[in-house]
Image (cartoon, grey):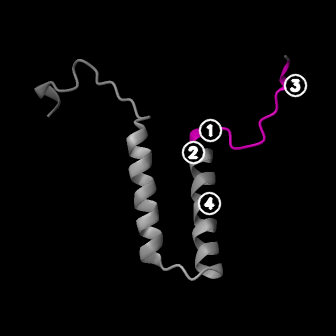
């Protein structure tokens, strides 16, 4: 497969992907505020519920270097 055969249509790096997610989320929130009778407290509750779901997925991994807790750095 050469470079011409591989095409990425979306954001390429982490920052661009984060921005795309935020912009989509902003647009979704604004759309629901304009088109529906939902209030912001209900939206915040739904978002908090989604935060808990994402937290439960446990897709964050963190490895601490051996010298991370050394007192010399304090």
Q: Secondary structure at mark 3?
A: helix
Disc 2: which residue: 15
Quarter of the image with the C terminus is top left
Q: Secondary structure at mark 1?
A: loop
Quarter of the image with the N terminus is top right
Image coords of residue 29 (percent x, y): 57, 69
- The residue furthest right is 4
Residue density around tag 1, few if under 14, some if 14–19, many if 20 or more, within 10 Å: few
Q: Secondary structure at mark 4?
A: helix
Above or below for 12 versus 20: above
Above or below for 41 versus 71: below
Image coords of residue 73 (percent x, y): 17, 30
**Labels 2 and 3: the sequence-earlier one:** 3
Disc 3: which residue: 5
Give whichever of 70, 5 is nearer the camera: 5
Above or below for 50 versus 67: below
In this rendering, position of residue 37 left or right of residue 10: left
Disc 4: which residue: 23
**Labels 3 and 4: the sequence-earlier one:** 3
Discs 2/4, front: 4
On whether residue 49 falls in the magenta region, the answer is no
Quadrant position of residue 30:
bottom right
Disc 1: which residue: 13
Magenta segment range? 2-14
Q: Residue at x 62, y 46 (%)?
A: 16
Given contact means CB atoms under 8 Å apart, are the residues at marks 1 and 4 in contact? no
Given contact means CB atoms under 8 Å apart, are the residues at marks 1 and 2 in contact? yes
- Alpha carbons under labels 3 and 4: distance apart: 29 Å
Discs 1/4, front: 4
- Alpha carbons under labels 3 and 1: distance apart: 20 Å
- Alpha carbons under labels 2 and 4: distance apart: 12 Å
């Amino acid at each position: 497969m050469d470079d011409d055969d591989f095409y990425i249509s979306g954001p390429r790096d982490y920052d661009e992907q984060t921005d795309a997610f935020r912009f989509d989320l902003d647009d979704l929130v604004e759309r629901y505020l304009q088109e529906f009778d939902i209030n912001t407290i209900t939206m915040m509750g739904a978002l908090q519920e989604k935060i808990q779901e994402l937290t439960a997925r446990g897709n964050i991994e963190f490895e601490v270097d051996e010298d991370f807790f050394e007192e010399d750095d304090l």
